[in-house]
C-alpha cells in the first residue's frame, strides 16, 4: 500500500506562510540543498495555484528524478501530478504509466490515470467542437460570399 497523496490533494495549495517556510529552508541550504528539502519545496510549489510555481516544482522534481535514482519511483507520481495540473497530459500519462508498470496495484496512480484519460477525452471533445464550429462558420461565410458574388455577377450582367 502506498502513502502517496491522491490527485485531489494537489488541488489544495499551501498557505503562503507554509510555502515560505519550505522556500526559506530550500534557499538556506543553497548549493548543498538536501534531496528531501528540495522534494518538499517542489511538492509545495506543485500544489500552488500559480502556474510559474507549478512549473518550478516540476523542474525541481525532474532534477531529483535524474540525480537521485533511489527517489525515482516516488518522483514518478509527483511528476505525473505536476504535469497534469499544468495541462501536459502526455507527460503526465508517461510518468504515471511508468509508475503503474512498477506498481500495477497503486490505487493513487490508477486514479490519476483515470483523471488524465477523462481530461484528455473532455478536452478532445471540446477541441472537436471548436474545430467543427469553425468549419461551420467557414462554410456559412463561404456560402455567403459565393451567393454575394453570384448576385453581384447577375447585377453586372443585367
Image: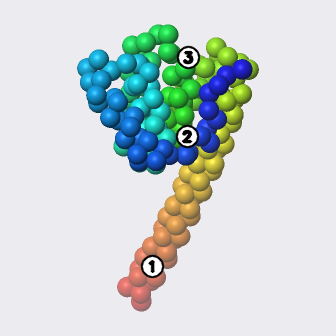
The percent coordinates of residue 83 (x first, y second) are: 49, 35
Q: Disc 1 versus disc 3: distance between alpha carbons?
A: 64 Å
Q: Is residue 55 left or right of residue 78?
A: left
The percent coordinates of residue 146 (x first, y second) are: 47, 72
Q: Which secondary structure lies at badge 2?
A: helix
Residue at the image point whose x is 62% and y is 32% from the top: 5
**Is the residue marked by circle 2 packed among few (<14), some (14-19), or many (20+) residues within 10 Å?**
many
Residue at the image point whose x is 41% and y is 32% from the top: 41
Quick check: 4 above or below 84?
A: above
Residue bearing mark 2: 10
The tag earlier along the polypeptide, 3 or 2, is: 2
Q: Tell me if label 1 and label 2 are in contact, CB under 8 Å.
A: no
Q: Which numbered marker is on residue 9? A: none
Could you say which quadrant of the image residue 26 lies in?
Answer: top left
Residue at the image point whose x is 39% and y is 25% from the top: 38
Residue bearing mark 3: 73
In the image shown, does 82 or 132 lie closer to the viewer? 82
Could you say which quadrant of the image residue 54 lies in?
Answer: top left
Could you say which quadrant of the image residue 145 lies in?
Answer: bottom left
In the image shown, does 86 or 34 lie closer to the viewer? 34
Q: State which mark lies toward you, 1 or 2.
A: 2
Q: Which numbered marker is on residue 148? A: 1
Q: Tell me if label 1 and label 3 are in contact, CB under 8 Å.
A: no
Amino acid at each position: 500500500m502506498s502513502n502517496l497523496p491522491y490527485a485531489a490533494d494537489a488541488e489544495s495549495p499551501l498557505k503562503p506562510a507554509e510555502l515560505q517556510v519550505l522556500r526559506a529552508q530550500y534557499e538556506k541550504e543553497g548549493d548543498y540543498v538536501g534531496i528531501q528539502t528540495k522534494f518538499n519545496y517542489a511538492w509545495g510549489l506543485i500544489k500552488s495555484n500559480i502556474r510559474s510555481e507549478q512549473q518550478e516544482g516540476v523542474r525541481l522534481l525532474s532534477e531529483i528524478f535524474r540525480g537521485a535514482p533511489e527517489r525515482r519511483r516516488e518522483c514518478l507520481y509527483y511528476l505525473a501530478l505536476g504535469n497534469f495540473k499544468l495541462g501536459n497530459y502526455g507527460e503526465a500519462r508517461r510518468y504515471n504509466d511508468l509508475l503503474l508498470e512498477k506498481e500495477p496495484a497503486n490505487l493513487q496512480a490508477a486514479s490519476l490515470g483515470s483523471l488524465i484519460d477523462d481530461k484528455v477525452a473532455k478536452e478532445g471533445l471540446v477541441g472537436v467542437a471548436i474545430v467543427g464550429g469553425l468549419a461551420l462558420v467557414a462554410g456559412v461565410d463561404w456560402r455567403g460570399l459565393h451567393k454575394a458574388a453570384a448576385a453581384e455577377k447577375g447585377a453586372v450582367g443585367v
